[in-house]
Image (cartoon, rainbow, N blue to C red):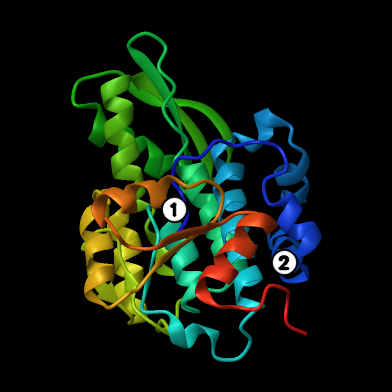
Amino acid sequence: MTARRISLVFGMGRLLSEAEPSARCVFERADRALGFALSRTCFEGPEETLRLTAVTQPAILATSVACLEALAARAPGGWRDGIACVAGHSLGEYSALVAAEALDLEDAVRIVRRRGEYMQEAVPAGAGAMAAVLGMPLDEVRALCRDASEGEVLAPANLNAPDQTVVAGTAGAVNRLVSLAKGRGAKDLGTLRLRDARFPVIVNVSARPESRAEALRQALLDQVTRPVRWVESVLGMKELGMDALVEVGPGRVLSGLAKRIAPGTPLFNIEDPASLLRACEAIGLPPTEAA
């Protein structure tokens, strides 16, 4: 699991990367997949770059997977045998798919970077707003504007690239366009390489366990426009027989939610070497990385 709302600070994942070769390897792989030093931004900032959605999302995913791999290094071989299921809140569903070996890390960081670009928030200016539409040619963006305007002002404003257009108009019209664009931009997820999951993934949109690749793909598509059913997801994990919940990634938001949803369930988080040690001790794993 990975937190949706976190306090982003410089050094996210840095201590774990310095202490754990398995965690460091995750950041190195993410850097290569994206073609830029995501790890440097996580570790050093600057803040304005780290807070860009298209950077924040792969940064959170890479940090979450790094925490997971640091835990996995202490139980080589059959460590996944003890996992009843996985789940992730919103963006965290991609981390859950990586954990379940349904999605490769490299594909995951690339798709969530694009997800972050698609999810650029409309920036209000009084009654107006702007939004970036990526992965869609100009003629299709114009058609979207016509479909979403409903009598309000909405039109392409900046033609940044053949597949990147900034639209501007009233806030209501821009919000409608964002919903339409997300739906029509499903081609990215449609081509994402997914495998059947090694163990169940409790998906956001239905709060049900899924393992088949196509069901997981459809869940990611549906996630764009449907709410996260997190209360039911946590209860669904209990129904699958989980004895404890381990939150991997920056922050403890989901642990706090789970404490209220499923009182009495043992909860652990992993975000740095100290919390990794506590979690390992609690669940009976070696305190140092296995050779």
Which of pointers 1 and 2 lies earlier in the amino acid sequence?
2
Determine which of the numbered discs, if any, sits on residue 29 in the image: 2
What amino acid type should be assigned to the residue bearing mark 1? Leu
Neighbourhood count class around disc 1 (C-alpha, 10 Å): few under 14, some 14–19, many 20 upward: many
Place of residue 260 in the rendered image (x, y in percent of width and height, measured from the top left): 27, 48
Instruction: Name the image quarter holding the N terminus.
Output: bottom left
Q: Residue at x 55, y 35 (%)?
A: 7
Place of residue 160 in the rendered image (x, y in percent of width and height, measured from the top left): 59, 34
Identify the secondary structure beneath mark 2.
helix
Q: Is residue 284 left or right of residue 155?
A: right
Q: Residue at x 19, y 26 (%)?
A: 150
Place of residue 248 in the rendered image (x, y in percent of width and height, measured from the top left): 52, 60
In the displayed structure, would residue 255 be above or below residue 70? above
What amino acid type should be assigned to the residue bearing mark 2? Arg
Identify the secondary structure beneath mark 1.
loop
Q: Number of callouts in the render?
A: 2
Residue closer to the observer: 241 or 22:
241
Residue found at the very far bottom of the displayed protein: 77
Place of residue 163 in the rendered image (x, y in percent of width and height, measured from the top left): 53, 45
Neighbourhood count class around disc 2 (C-alpha, 10 Å): few under 14, some 14–19, many 20 upward: some
For marks 1 and 2, give the CA distance. Answer: 19 Å
Instruction: Name the image quarter holding the C terminus.
Output: bottom right
Q: Residue at x 25, y 53 (%)?
A: 261
Q: Is residue 218 left or right of residue 38?
A: left
Q: Residue at x 43, y 31 (%)?
A: 121
Query: Is residue 134 in view?
Result: no
- In which quadrant of the rendered view does residue 195 lie? bottom left
Q: Which residue is mark 1?
A: 91
Determine which of the numbered discs, if any, sits on residue 16 in the image: none
Query: Is residue 121 in view?
Result: yes
In the displayed structure, would residue 46 be above or below residue 65? above
- The answer to whether the residues at label 1 and label 2 have Cβ atoms under 8 Å apart is no
